[in-house]
């Protein structure tokens, strides 16, 4: 069975006004050794039929239909079916440049675990960028460099992952939460032996008023972020690099800054103290 260079995974749910332009940006890539996996996450509109129509016209398009389980489960379903050497995640209301895959090819030659790209908002003009180093570097070292400079976007769509790296490290998205990227991306970088910046701004994202995160109330957003930060803080406390540990713990606190009404100093204190207790308990269990 042929192994394409790239698998592009697209979770699909209630985006009938956006899906066509998204998929057109994928099937019209100037580099064609790709597969496109559309994961219909129980969408109640015309999206399932549109996905099937794309698959009928282009053999590179594969469709998964499943009951609604959320973005993480849809991405994970796509990962289970993916055959490409590298994996891109694209949200179904966004687009990528038509030459994205072509421009990424040179960076795959040395088989990095993660290729780093940039993105820009089509509505607000806000750019998510990196620009820290042009060398191949370990994932933890890259995060330390990026966090020192205050620019480490967590959006999973900005990164291209070697599929075998994800499989060997059992990296998948946690289901049932919002802001799954904040939970996934740091774990991926901590596991990566080799990452590289491409300096390619290829991803164009839309901020919609009816998107998953903007629809959910403040309490749900904050509660999910808080739980994610506690989970990550316990992981960070096990790091031997104290500077990286503190930078990552601080990054947990900064996640809450856009959410007004939450006292971030108190949250940071709680995160730090609870993470220490969790880490101490994990250490204690070894001797029980």
Image (spheres, grey):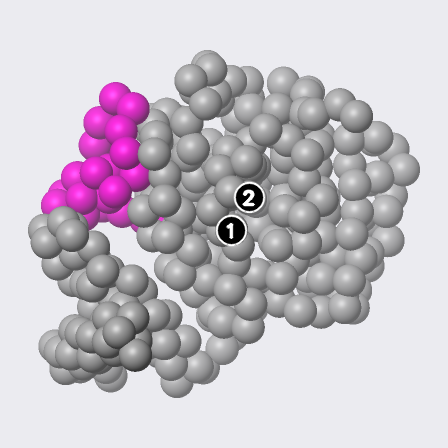
Disc 2 marks which residue? 167
Q: Is residue 84 above or below residue 283?
A: above
Disc 1 marks which residue? 170
Disc 1 packing (10 Å; few <14; some 14–19; many ≥20): few
Q: Is the magenta region chiefly helix, strand or loop?
A: loop
Q: Is residue 66 visible?
A: yes
x, y percent for residue 206? 50, 51
Quadrant containing the C terminus is bottom left
What residue is rendered at 62% in x and 24% in y? 5
Disc 2 packing (10 Å; few <14; some 14–19; many ≥20): few
Which residue is nearer to you in this view: 104 or 243? 243
Disc 1 + disc 2, Cβ < 8 Å? yes
Which residue is nearer to you in this view: 263 or 73? 73
x, y percent for residue 198? 37, 25
What residue is rendered at 59% in x and 28% in y? 85
Magenta range: 129-154
> In this rendering, would 76 be left or right of 266?
right
Q: Secondary structure at mark 1?
A: loop
x, y percent for residue 83? 68, 34
> In this rendering, would 272 be left or right of 65?
left
> In this rendering, would 62 be left or right of 134?
right
Which residue is nearer to you in this view: 145 or 193? 193
x, y percent for residue 271? 21, 75
Q: Was residue 139 drawn as part of the magenta stretch in this picture?
A: yes
């Amino acid at each position: 069975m042929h192994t394409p260079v790239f698998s592009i995974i697209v979770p699909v749910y209630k985006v009938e006004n956006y899906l066509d332009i998204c998929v057109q940006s994928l099937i019209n890539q100037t580099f064609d050794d790709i597969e496109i996996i559309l994961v219909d996450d129980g969408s109640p509109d015309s999206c399932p039929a549109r996905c099937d129509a794309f698959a009928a016209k282009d053999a590179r398009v594969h469709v998964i239909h499943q009951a609604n389980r959320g973005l993480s489960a849809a991405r994970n379903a796509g990962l289970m079916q993916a055959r490409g050497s590298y994996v891109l995640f694209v949200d179904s209301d966004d687009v990528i440049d038509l030459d994205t895959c072509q421009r990424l090819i040179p960076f795959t030659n040395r088989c990095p675990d993660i290729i780093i790209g940039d993105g820009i908002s089509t509505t607000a003009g806000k750019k998510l960028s990196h620009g820290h180093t042009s060398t191949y570097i370990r994932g933890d070292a890259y995060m330390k460099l990026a966090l020192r400079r205050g620019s480490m976007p967590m959006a999973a769509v900005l990164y291209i992952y070697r599929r075998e790296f994800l499989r060997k490290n059992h990296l998948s998205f946690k289901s049932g939460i919002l802001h799954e990227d904040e939970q996934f991306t740091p774990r991926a970088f901590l596991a990566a032996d080799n990452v590289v910046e491409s300096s390619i701004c290829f991803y164009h994202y839309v901020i919609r008023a009816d998107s998953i995160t903007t629809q959910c109330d403040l309490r749900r957003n904050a509660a999910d972020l808080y739980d994610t930060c506690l989970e990550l803080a316990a992981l960070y406390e096990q790091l031997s690099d104290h500077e990286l540990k503190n930078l990552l713990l601080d990054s947990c606190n900064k996640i809450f800054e856009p959410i007004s009404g939450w006292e971030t100093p108190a949250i940071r204190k709680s995160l730090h103290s609870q993470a220490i207790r969790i880490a101490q308990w994990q250490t204690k269990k070894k001797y029980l």
